Image (cartoon, rainbow, N blue to C red):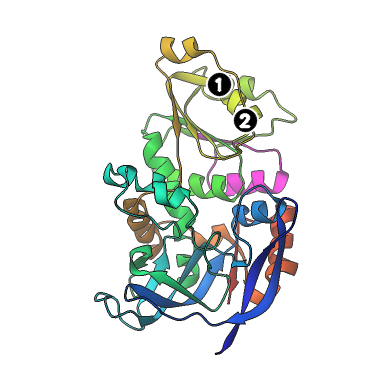
Amino acid sequence: MGKMLAAVFHKSNKLGGDIKLEEVDLPYVTKSNQVLVEIKACGICGTDLKIIEGGHPANDNTILGHEFAGIVREVGESVQDLEIGDKVVADPNEKCGYCINCRRGLSNLCEYMASGTTFGIFQDGGFAKYCVLPRSSLFKLPKKIDLIAASLIEPLSCAVHCHNIANVKESDNVVIIGAGPMGLIIESVIRKHPIKRLISIEIDEWRGQKALDLGADLLINPDTSNVQKEIMKFTNNEGADVIIDAVGISKTFEMATNFWAPGARLICFGQDNRAEAKIKPNDIVRYQRQILGSYIGYAEDFLDAIELVANKAIDIDKLITEVIPLEKLILTGFKLMKERKCVKIIALP
């Protein structure tokens, strides 16, 4: 059996663990519904860092990487609609299709998925030359699409889902809290929609400048400015109609409730299961505000994200900071992520 280089997570006795580049056996198709994909590009996600640091669960001895695109190299006998050479992108979150949430159209909340099925976290993923996935986890891509750009489709689908939940309107003042990779990708999607104003809240200078480059009308550093006062001044005392908390900690949630307009939608996107926050229910009732969660996305969000990339409706070059060989994943890729001086780092196996 042949070997391939892969980035493998090794769980420690404590929370988190290490990721190591090592030679592993080549995977192969064993079931009729499976597809062997040659990975052409895989993005580093903040979740990968959280796994190493103990902030997100993952299975021991698993190949990480859940934002990937590639080319079909082998198909199981029951796969009829994919051919060798087809370009595909993976939806890494494997769903069952039959639990109550799936059948209610909430496939992103699949009960089976919640037990731990994600490729690149609980099953082997894209930081390797090859990966085997079920046909149901793959979207066929247009022939014209660039596969490095296609590695952004998974995070873009999450941003599309967030945008749709926010129900952004032309007259809205939009505030995005946090200009990390996902905050910036969400900004790129929202900027495709005509809106009144877009405000970014970010403490890091590099990330803040990136938010301005992508189209933010105002940048506010909460460490040096009074956020509420600045937003109310900039919006002529209207406040924010849509607030997207792309951080997800107690401080950012409570911050958002200081400047939301009547009828506002507060979208909780960033995740931290340790966060707790206080809120006055009457502030929601009296001003008919909404607090909504946005978690990954639906299949239709993947379809929309594919079109955004295929039609070059999103400036991908502004979202990809560095393209590196897999061999440099740890020393270069994860180093840049930890330094917070990047949007997306793409590894080429």
At x 33%, y 71%, the residue is 142
Q: Which mark is residue 257?
A: 1
Residue 43 in which image quadrant = bottom right
Q: Earlier in the sequence, mark 2 or mark 1?
A: 2
Picture quarter with the N terminus: bottom right
Q: Residue flagged by tag 2: what amino acid is it?
A: Thr
Picture quarter with the C terminus: bottom right
Magenta stretch: give its range: 198-216
For label 1, count other residues whose C-alpha is less than 10 Å away and answer few (under 14), some (14-19) or many (20+): some
Q: Give the residue number, with chain letter if any, for mark 2.
A: 252
At x 64%, y 69%, the residue is 8
Give the percent coordinates (x, y) of residue 251.
66, 28
Query: In front here: 268 or 263?
Result: 268
Residue 175 colored in magenta in the image: no
Give the percent coordinates (x, y) of residue 231.
58, 24
Residue 325 visible somewhere in the drawing: no
